[in-house]
């Protein structure tokens, strides 16, 4: 806990004294699984702190806690733009992408973070998690190559994940055949007309 964290809040202090360091307090709130409160606090200080990478990182952490991955990703991308030499937002972005299952993007982002700081502990932790996830999702010998498990990879696709995503989008966008119950309903309606 920070010096400006819950100690002041729990003792009943309020006003500017309690929020002398809103970033530290927001960090403490997120650690205490109070992401909504952290976002409320951060939003009150957006004008003053909105251009600081740490502010955006805390917003991203809170949104991730709440399951709003799109906003979290947006905040992290802005933090990367504001601090291109800092590996922390890149590592967090890679971790978010890994959590969302975007393994190739996570690997690319993590490579950039590792280039900035090869011995960064958080980056090494995410890299291990990425390796473990890839090992879990790798096809087993019984599954065989991609064509044997129903993936057709065109020459234009660089990887199997992109091919699988494209096939899934095409399957979801394809018109759905009429269900038997609806065919019976149409036939009965035509009989009574």
Image: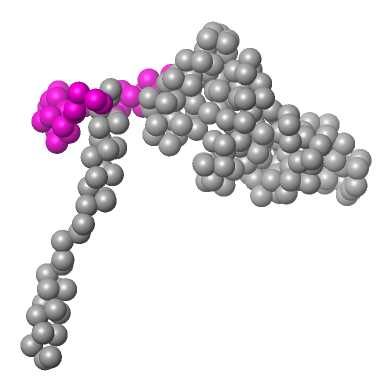
- Determine which quarter of the picture holds residue 28: top right
The residue positioned farthest toward the bottom in the image shown: 192
Percent of width and height locating residue 5:
79, 37
**Front residue (pair 33, 66):** 66
- On the image, the x and y values in percent for residue 22 come to 80, 37
Q: Identify the image quadrant of the C terminus.
A: bottom left
Left or right of 19 on screen, residue 58: left
Across and down, in percent, residue 40 comes to 73, 49
Residue displayed at 26% across by 50% down: 172
Q: Which residues are magenta?
A: 128-157
Residue 82 showing in the rendered view: yes
Q: In front here: 175 or 31? A: 175
Is residue 137 shown left or right of residue 1? Answer: left
Residue 67 position (above or below residue 163): below
Check the image and report above or below for 150 versus 145: below
The quarter of the picture where residue 136 lies is top left
Q: Which residue is rendered at x = 69% and y = 28% of the image?
A: 53
């Amino acid at each position: 806990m920070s010096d400006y964290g819950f100690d002041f809040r729990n003792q009943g202090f309020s006003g500017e004294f309690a929020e002398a360091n809103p970033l530290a307090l927001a960090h403490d709130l997120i650690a205490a699984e109070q992401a909504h409160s952290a976002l409320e606090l951060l939003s009150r200080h957006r004008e003053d702190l909105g251009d600081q990478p740490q502010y955006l990182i805390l917003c991203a952490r809170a949104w991730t806690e709440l399951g709003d991955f799109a906003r979290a990703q947006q905040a992290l991308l802005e933090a990367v733009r504001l601090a291109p030499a800092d590996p922390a937002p890149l590592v967090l972005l890679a971790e978010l992408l890994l959590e969302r299952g975007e393994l190739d993007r996570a690997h690319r982002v993590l490579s950039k973070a590792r280039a900035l700081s090869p011995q960064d502990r958080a980056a090494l932790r995410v890299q291990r998690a990425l390796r473990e996830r890839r090992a879990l999702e790798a096809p087993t010998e019984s599954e065989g190559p991609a064509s044997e498990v129903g993936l057709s990879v065109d020459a234009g696709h660089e990887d199997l994940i992109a091919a699988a995503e494209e096939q899934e989008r095409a399957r979801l966008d394809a018109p759905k055949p009429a269900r038997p119950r609806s065919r019976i309903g149409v036939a009965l309606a035509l009989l009574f007309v």
